[in-house]
Image: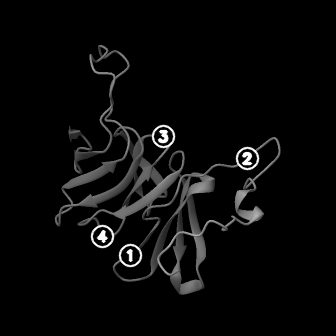
């Protein structure tokens, strides 16, 4: 009957089989916001998770790769910082637990900011003076911090960063 659970349903064998086999199984974090385009539409910035890099593509030349900049382990999100003439791009690195600040005109990382476990998304205020980073794991705890009394870890935080000085203001 309609709306009733079926007792005779079986999952196809292909859904139950492992996705990969062998000595090496590649693992990549899921992309969250992996693509940004410059205001003028000329430049495309892409998180290349498998290569741990930010790829800069020129849209006027059939998506020609202009730069491939190492940023950190498993980049999953990119965001152009407002007020920088689209030259500063921030990248959330999921496994590195960092955000890389990249000058795409120079093709180099200007700073790497420790933000906490598993950053997944970056937003800016309209002036580009503050960055807000969503982390899905626990907040950053220095190695020399005393142990906490609670066995439970709070998951998911919003980290605020001064986008001018790159100082973490709150986490």
Residue 21 percent location from the top left of the image: 80, 49
Residue 92 percent location from the top left of the image: 41, 52
- The disc, 2 or 4, on the residue closer to the chain's N-terminal end is 2
Residue nearer the viewer, 35 or 32 = 32
Mark identifier at residue 38: 1
Outermost residue, front side:
1
Q: Cα distance, mark 2 to mark 4?
A: 40 Å
Mark identifier at residue 118: none
Relative vertical location of residue 18 with respect to residue 11 in this rendering, above or below: above
Mark identifier at residue 85: 4
Relative vertical location of residue 54 with respect to residue 73 in this rendering, above or below: below
Residue under pointer 3: 96
Q: Is residue 80 left or right of residue 51?
A: left
Q: Cα distance, mark 4 to mark 1?
A: 9 Å
- The disc, 2 or 3, on the residue closer to the chain's N-terminal end is 2
Q: Cα distance, mark 1 to mark 3?
A: 26 Å
Give the foreground label among 2 and 4: 2
Q: Determine crowd level at label 2: few under 14, some 14-19, many 20+ residues with C-alpha closer than 10 A.
A: few
Secondary structure, mark 3, is loop
Give the foreground label among 2 and 3: 2
Q: Is residue 140 left or right of residue 46?
A: left
Task: State the residue at coordinates (50%, 60%).
Answer: 31
- The disc, 1 or 2, on the residue closer to the chain's N-terminal end is 2
């Amino acid at each position: 009957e309609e709306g009733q659970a079926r007792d005779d349903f079986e999952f196809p064998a292909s859904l139950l089989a492992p996705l990969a086999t062998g000595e090496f199984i590649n693992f990549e974090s899921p992309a969250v916001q992996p693509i940004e385009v410059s205001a003028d539409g000329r430049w495309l910035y892409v998180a290349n998770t498998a290569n741990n890099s930010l790829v800069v593509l020129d849209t006027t030349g059939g998506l020609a790769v202009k730069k491939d900049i190492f940023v950190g382990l498993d980049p999953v999100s990119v965001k152009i910082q407002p007020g920088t003439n689209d030259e500063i791009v921030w990248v959330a690195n999921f496994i590195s637990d960092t955000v890389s600040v990249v000058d795409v005109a120079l093709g180099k990382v200007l700073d790497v900011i420790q933000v906490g476990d598993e950053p997944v998304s970056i937003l800016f205020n309209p002036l580009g003076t503050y960055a807000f980073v969503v982390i899905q794991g626990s907040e950053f705890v220095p190695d020399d911090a005393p142990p906490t009394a609670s066995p439970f870890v709070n998951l998911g935080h919003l980290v605020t960063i001064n986008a001018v000085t790159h100082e973490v203001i709150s986490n």
